[in-house]
Image (cartoon, rainbow, N blue to C red):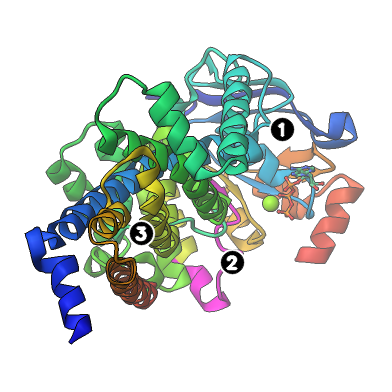
Amino acid sequence: MDLKRRFISNFLTDDRWKYLWNGLGVTLKVTFFAVLLGILLGVIIAIVRSTYEKNSSSMRMGFGKMILVFLNFLCKVYLTIIRGTPVVVQLMIMYYVILASSTNKVLVAILAFGINSGAYVAEIFRSGIMSIDAGQFEAGRSLGFNFVQTMRYIIVPQAFKNVLPALANEFIVLLKETSVAGYVALADLTKGGDIIRSRTYDAFMPLIGVALIYLILVMFFTWLVGKLERRLRSSER
Amino acid sequence: MSDNQTLIKVENLQKHYNGGAIKALDGINTEIKQGEVVVVIGPSGSGKSTFLRCLNLLEVPTGGSIFFEGVDITDEKTNINIHRQKMGMVFQHFNLFPHMTILKNMIIAPMKLRKKSEAEATELAMGLLRRVGLEDRANAYPSQLSGGQKQRIAIVRALCMEPEVMLFDEPTSALDPEMVGEVLEVMKQLAKDNMTMVVVTHEMGFAREVGTRVMFMADGKQVEEGTPAEIFDNPKSDRLQTFLAKVL
Ligand SMILES: Nc1ncnc2c1ncn2[C@@H]1O[C@H](COP(=O)(O)OP(=O)(O)OP(=O)(O)O)[C@@H](O)[C@H]1O
Ligand SMILES: [Mg+2]
């Protein structure tokens, strides 16, 4: 009886479930676009890094090599900073320092989590590119494709397929990681539960509710990734 | 074009590794004329692959020059991508693109690089597939083919760019013995159609029958060069005699 009353007051009174529902929307939106941004950044960084690793020793000294060395240095700085600091701190720096004038919290969160995720996607993708046989690259170049075309048509699609399950996992990791978005007062799922708690002075119901929603989402996406992996494996001819 | 126009001219070509400690190529000079089939033979590690891969700059030479249709392609200002479009290459391990169908493997380069329409590129590709008897495999993926079929596809994929010269690096070495013949047959046909070819191979029968010139390499140098008859029936150097005694 008591549980029922608490359920009603936490979720139904004043349409409080809407905090969770809207928060869930924000969480999914931030996660989705952050992963997209992370993939974009990660692919570029992975291409720079693997090109440097594979070719820098055999390249002629010249303009092209100087650019490559410089880009590789930039990427290394980025990876070091992103992986060496907590994501909450990065988020707060983005909100209070870099984009202090922006009022679009969702955008700030997408940028912060996307830039963070890029560092991890880069490593996933780099291993994907390095696992492609060098003969694929040579075959592309021997047909007359330039470096970028060879990457675009031949290497990246194969690498992408190889790392698709790992990328999907990154999505799941990020889904949980964005729960710290409340630090910049973004009304995501976790924050939604917290708002309810501050209204009803009941911690149990809203927090357990939030945890359950995350759990169900993670289990669903994990199941999806598993399905994807099985399909990829069976299409491996 | 006349039959004896020079297509490729190689001058004092060098490829050194580890600051000159390894001389994979040590001053190669040769000319390859239109319609010639130059077969490169030699012991393992003699620099055959390095020589072939230098011709389209997959390996960057450390010295000397390569002129393709009169243009020095080792010059840094030369856009090598344009010239590579006219130099087809076939690898020992086929290197087909596993994520594309056979047809896509063949039409992607003509479409993206020579701006052919899909219909145009497909027509050319299907014609070539028919010539090697694989038109029914157009929509298969590379992994669904046998080694011999893969290598025949690799050859016609290169031909789709309508190259001036075809470079082969041991195209039959990774094949089961019963599949060697079908690939050599395609290459023979190509030679008959007057394609200029540079072929690294251990198939001495092919060298003798199809080659217009045989180049014997050892230690990064061209030790002996001549017609198949000169090389196989009248070897002059000790190195070549020893080599032939082992392989024939
Ligand atoms: N990246 C490299 N670094 C150092 N040495 C190399 C490198 N690539 C090739 N070499 C050396 O250059 C020499 C020529 O090699 P190459 O592959 O051209 O020989 P090959 O005649 O094709 O031999 P095979 O018949 O075994 O294919 C060899 O001694 C090889 O060890
Ligand atoms: Mg070789």
Which segment did they paint magenta? B165-182
Task: Please state which amino acid type lies under the numbered disc 1.
Answer: Ser
Category of crowding for the residue at label 1, using alpha-carbon neighbours closer than 10 angstroms: few (below 14), some (14–19), many (at least 20) = few
Identified at 33% across, 53% down, the residue is: B105
Task: Please state which amino acid type lies under the numbered disc 2.
Answer: Ala
The chain that hosts pointer 2 is: B
Q: Residue B65 in the image: state x and y as whole percent.
A: 66, 19
Instruction: Tell whether circle 1 marks a residue whose Cβ is less than 8 angstroms from ligand 1.
Output: no
Rounded to the nearest angstrom, the CA distance separating label 3 from label 1 is 30 Å
Which disc number belongs to residue A225?
A: none
User: In the image, is residue B172 part of the stretch drawn in magenta?
Assistant: yes
Using the image as rendered, state which of residue B175 and residue A198 is in the foreground: A198
Using the image as rendered, state which of residue B118 and residue B8 is in the foreground: B118
Label 3 sits on a secondary structure element that is: loop
Instruction: Tell whether circle 2 marks a residue whose Cβ is less than 8 angstroms from ligand 1.
Output: no
Residue corresponding to mark 3: B99
- Is the residue at mark 3 from the same chain as the one at mark 1? no
Which disc number belongs to residue B174?
A: 2
- Is the residue at mark 3 from the same chain as the one at mark 2? yes
Tell me: residue B70, above or below residue B182. Answer: above
User: Is residue B35 in view?
Assistant: no
User: In the image, is residue B38 part of the stretch drawn in magenta?
Assistant: no
Labelled pair 3, 2 in contact (Cβ < 8 Å): no
Rounded to the nearest angstrom, the CA distance separating label 3 from label 2 is 21 Å
Identified at 61% across, 20% down, the residue is: B74
Label 2 sits on a secondary structure element that is: loop
- Is the residue at mark 1 from the same chain as the one at mark 2? no
The chain that hosts pointer 1 is: A
* Res. A99 image quadrant: top left
Which disc number belongs to residue A57?
A: 1
Task: Please state which amino acid type lies under the numbered disc 3.
Answer: His
